[in-house]
Image (tube, rainbow, N blue to C red):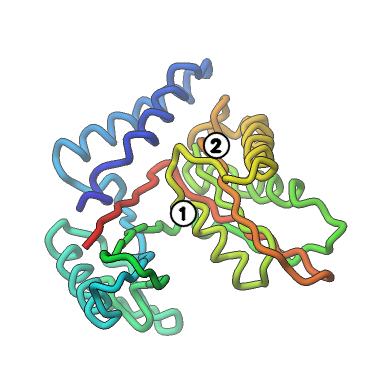
């Protein structure tokens, strides 16, 4: 319920600052509506968006719990939340399109596991809607191709579809599958944090400015703010490859963390 009804304060503040500096009246109206939506969702304890996403979890498994315990608790929690909050049933079979009705299905919820020696287990819930996910892209670039060009091309092609102002998670390197995982992990980083590597942090800032210069604006109506944040994660890769994944996230950056 915390993730679905309350936007992180840092994200809300970024949207408020975007509203204050925006000069395009239509863009200001979009941002005003977004801020009002956030306020009402918090006050009424209702979902921020009608697309309550698919259930995506990151688990750092400590010594105090077993994988089976956490997995069973997550599955039951998703079923309960779907009924009580309520959440829109979004999970279907990819082939028959049959809806499970409770946001649980084959290999769903998605749970990413990381082992830890800590005395507690940390769980991150990151519901991801289809509007922004459908606009995300992955490409196996040649080593001499431009990462920046691919990132900007992805945002330009997306236009207003991912419900900007967006947050952009970028995974560079690794392999075909791992670059996508890195892009998703970039999105769950604390909103106020940059990459700890100074050069990568500078690249985040460069891409942030470039994306906002596109003028797509809130909900695609034009304006100064297309992007609220860019986060980049990297991994070493094969000498002949340059995998790059760009995972777009809408303004409704829903995320919650709990330690058990």
On screen, residue 73 above or below 195: below
Q: Which image quarter is the C terminus in?
A: bottom left
Which numbered disc covers residue 61?
A: none
> Quick check: 249 left or right of 238?
left
Residue extending farthest right:
144
Q: Give the residue drawn at x 60%, y 34%.
A: 216
On screen, residue 193 above or below 121: above
> Quick check: 81 left or right of 141?
left
Q: Secondary structure at mark 1?
A: helix
Which residue is disc 1 drawn over?
131
Question: Label 2: how many residues lie within 10 Å, few (<14), some (14-19) or many (20+)?
Answer: many
Which residue is disc 2 drawn over?
227
Closer-to-camera residue (197/163): 197
Gap in angstroms between the C-alphas marked 2 and 1: 15 Å
Q: Give the residue drawn at x 27%, y 77%.
A: 71
Q: Secondary structure at mark 2?
A: strand
Residue 137 locus on image (x, y percent): 62, 60
Residue 142 locus on image (x, y percent): 83, 64
Q: Give the residue drawn at x 54%, y 66%.
A: 181
Closer-to-camera residue (57/32): 57
Residue 82 locus on image (x, y percent): 20, 64
- In which quadrant of the rendered view does residue 236 lie? bottom right
- In which quadrant of the rendered view does residue 29 lie? top left
Q: How many marks?
A: 2
Residue 60 locus on image (x, y percent): 36, 66
Instruction: Say which of marks 2 and 1 sits in front.
Output: 2
Ranked by sequence position, the earlier of labels 2 and 1 is: 1
Q: Give the residue drawn at x 40%, y 58%.
A: 128
On screen, residue 109 above or below 42: below
Question: Label 1: how many residues lie within 10 Å, few (<14), some (14-19) or many (20+)?
Answer: some
């Amino acid at each position: 319920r915390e993730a679905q009804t309350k936007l992180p304060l840092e994200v809300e503040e970024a949207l408020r600052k975007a509203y204050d500096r925006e000069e395009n009246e239509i863009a200001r109206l979009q941002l005003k509506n977004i801020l009002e939506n956030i306020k009402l969702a918090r006050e009424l304890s209702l979902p921020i968006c009608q697309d309550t996403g698919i259930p995506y979890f990151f688990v750092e498994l400590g010594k105090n719990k077993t994988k089976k315990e956490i997995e069973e608790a997550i599955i039951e929690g998703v079923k309960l939340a779907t009924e009580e909050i309520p959440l829109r049933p979004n999970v279907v079979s990819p082939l028959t399109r049959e809806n499970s009705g409770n946001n649980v299905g084959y290999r769903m919820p998605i749970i990413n596991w990381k082992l830890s020696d800590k005395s507690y287990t940390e769980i991150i819930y990151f519901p991801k809607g289809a509007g922004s996910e459908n606009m995300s892209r992955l490409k196996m670039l040649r080593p001499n191709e431009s990462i920046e060009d691919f990132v900007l091309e992805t945002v330009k092609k997306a236009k207003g579809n991912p419900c900007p102002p967006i947050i952009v998670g970028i995974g560079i390197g690794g392999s075909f599958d791992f670059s996508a995982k890195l892009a998703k992990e970039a999105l769950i980083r604390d909103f106020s944090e940059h990459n700890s590597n100074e050069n990568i942090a500078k690249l985040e800032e460069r891409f942030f400015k470039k994306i906002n210069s596109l003028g797509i604006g809130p909900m695609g109506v034009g304006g100064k703010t297309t992007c609220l944040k860019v986060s980049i994660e990297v991994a070493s890769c094969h000498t002949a490859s340059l995998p790059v994944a760009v995972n777009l996230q809408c303004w409704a950056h829903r995320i919650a963390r709990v330690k058990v």
